[in-house]
Image (cartoon, rainbow, N blue to C red):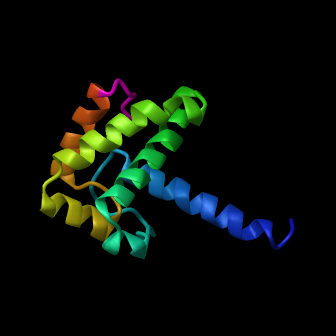
Amino acid sequence: MTMRRLPLLIATGLIAIGATAALAGGSSAPFQQYEPDPALKTATKANLEGRVRHACTIVQARLTSAPEAALERPCGCYAKQTLRSLDESEVEAYRATGYFNDSARAKALAALDSCKLQRPI
């Protein structure tokens, strides 16, 4: 493996970890050895929406074996609905931890159902 590919593999692995954390589901208990991206703390809501959309496409592609491109629209629906439904404290909790807290998770699950996406639980 060349040294040029190593950063790409590391970045892909970190995105996959973040993707699992951002999508609704599972427990709100802190993830073992998970470090949220420091850029979350200052990210705009539009950037957060893009991150959630991207995480959704990765996880949904894994769950459904559909190509990521086919999930752009439903995952855009999910990201938009989820972030619009969160109050400021839920957004701040997401910025601090990189995953949805319990109250935000309930809203995200409702958005998954509304956008006709598969729940990861």
Tell me where residue 42 appears, x and y as whole percent. 33, 74
Using the rendered view, name the quadrant where residue 113 is placed. top left
Note whether residue 25 is visible.
no
Using the rendered view, name the quadrant where residue 68 is placed. top right
66 on left or right of 51: right
Which residue sits at x=40%, y=76%?
A: 38
Give the mark count. 0
Image position of 17 with respect to 59: above or below? below
Which residue sits at x=26%, y=34%?
A: 111
- Which image quadrant: the N terminus? bottom right
The stretch in magenta equals: 115-121
Note whether residue 106 is visible.
yes
Using the rendered view, name the quadrant where residue 101 is placed. bottom left
Magenta span includes 80: no
48 on left or right of 91: right
58 on left or right of 24: right
In the rendered image, the residue lying farthest to the top is 116
Prevailing SS of the magenta stretch: loop
Q: Considering depth in this image, is 43 or 99 the residue closer to the camera?
A: 43
Which residue sits at x=19%, y=41%?
A: 106
Which residue sits at x=44%, y=67%?
A: 34
Tell me where residue 48 appears, x and y as whole percent. 35, 58
Magenta span includes 118: yes
- Which image quadrant: the C terminus? top left
Tell me where residue 107 appears, x and y as whole percent. 19, 41
78 on left or right of 17: left
Tell me where residue 102 appears, x and y as whole percent. 19, 51
Q: Considering depth in this image, is 17 or 92 the residue closer to the camera?
A: 92
